[in-house]
Amino acid sequence: MNPEDSMRDRITAELETTRPPLGDLVARSVAEARRKRRRARIGAGAVSAVGVLAVAGAVAQFAPSSAATAHDTGSGSGAAPGVHPTATTPTKPSPTAPRGTSSSPKTADSTDPTDPTAPTAPTSPSSATTTKLPVSSIVQHVNPGPVTLAKGFYLSYSTSSMSWWTYEGGLTMQYNGSNTWGSDFVGGGISDRLVTGMYVGDKDIAAASMTVDGTVYPATVVKVNGSQGWCGLYVLRPAGVTTWNTFRINVYDTSGALVATSFSGEITGTPPSSLPTSQPTGHPNGTLPYTNIPLGAPFPGATIVPPSEGGK
Amino acid sequence: MSVDTEFTAYAAARAQRLRDTAYLLCGDWHAAQDLTQATLVKLYGAWKRVERSESIDAYARQVMLRTFLDSRRLKRSTERPVADVPEGAAPVGGDPALRLTLLAALARLPINRRAVLVLRFWEDQSVEATAEAMGLSVSAVKSLTQRALAELREVLRDDTALAELDFLLV
């Protein structure tokens, strides 16, 4: 017997004296293996289902967005064709610019290298996209305080007001707890690259679009924590895009229905309030809850708050 | 024949041997039971692929070794299960009944040295096969084997059987 065999026999002998019964080791192993295989299959199925839903959601989000574009650009508002070949990249920000600024549009500031960026204020993740919505849902819940969108573009929120500030100036819109324009209204304005708005009403706004000279931008809906009865809207257009002739703001609730709309610009065609009922407005009877807020005037009780930083 | 039937037949035939190997690696029958079960579960998951290979035993041995080494690496710093209280070195000469058993001495070795001895002398693997199974070089396996035997000899002292194993180191 060689040394290896000798060692092996010795080990075997020692094992014999201490080895406990095997018991149901094999049966337990097989049962555990089956459970593991079952869990793996369920997990793989769940992953597949999530993948299918994600693709379906993306497709559904895309298709209504195109419909919204057609609606906004063909609403009979008489808006001039898009004069700015801008991208339709969703961007961010704020409210009412004096109409007069449109007559002498500001040229692109070549010293501003910034691009639309996310707000720096504490925000919660965007809410899930509702497949019925005609535009992408970008909803941010922020704490009261300032929001820096890009260099020279600021927003500031309180529980009852929103202020914006750009190179052209700033303005505060305030919700004073009452609504003298109706149950649902939206107003807004443009200054430089910043398009802002404010919705007042009791609807749960899930999405908004801002159409500037025919280009549709999915707007960011800002809900200030602790506030009630209003929400802010904004789009920060791409760098270099500063002029405008017409713009429209549409806000949608969670079902995708159009809650309020606002148009600013010279109306040369049929007013939106007399749209034919076949117009795909999202409203049951085709009549828009049309509101046209006078631009350049703050809401009652508004207080202009100077920016804490920035400016030209 | 279904996968379950084939696997169950194999497991029933090999479970004892696998558990013995697991015991030599772990030094504890409870841990050996767990290691054997973990090995069989992994083997079941790969059964369709493994049964077409030449050696199911080699695959099972490899799975067990990797599972053991992985679990030891994870637990080495926090957990060290022992079946008995630590013992001192066996007395020189004296009553053979008091002599430390080979298995107990084996359980005292570091895991890498223990694994090398188990593969080389229990599983009857060549140096090359041991090196491949452990992901080491041939020279590293030889070195580990030499040190493991030296350590065993130190613990067992007068065990003449171990002296014969020195011939294996050439």
Image: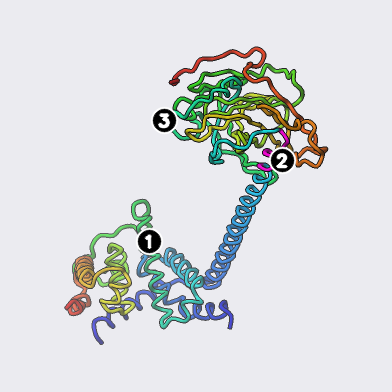
* Picture coordinates of residue A140, whole percent (x, y): 58, 33
Residue, disc 1: B70
Amino acid type, label 2: Gly
Viewer-side residue, B133 vs A272: A272
Single out the residue that lies furthest toward the bottom: A1
Kindly report the distance in space between the C-alpha atoms of the residues bearing marks 1 and 2. Answer: 54 Å
Mark 3 surroundings within 10 Å by alpha-carbon count, few (fewer than 14), some (14 through 19), many (20 or more): few
Residue A72 falls inside the magenta stretch: yes
Kindly report the distance in space between the C-alpha atoms of the residues bearing marks 2 and 3. Answer: 39 Å
Residue A200 falls inside the magenta stretch: no
| Residue B94 visible, this angle | no
* Picture coordinates of residue A240, whole percent (x, y): 48, 33
Callout 3 and callout 1 share a chain: no
Residue A110, disc:
3
Residue at (45%, 20%) from the top-left corner? A311
| Residue B161 visible, this angle | yes
**Quarter assignment of residue A128:** top right
Quadrant of the rendering where the N terminus of chain A is positioned: bottom left
- The disc numbered 2 marks a residue on which chain? A
* Picture coordinates of residue B54, whole percent (x, y): 41, 83
Residue at (21%, 75%) from the top-left corner? B162
B91 to the left or right of A223: left
Amino acid type, label 3: Ser
- Contact (CB < 8 A) between labels 3 and 1? no
Amino acid type, label 1: Asp
Residue, disc 2: A256
Span of residues in magenta:
A69-77
Residue at (58%, 24%) from the top-left corner? A102
Q: Nearer the viewer, mark 1 or mark 2?
A: 2
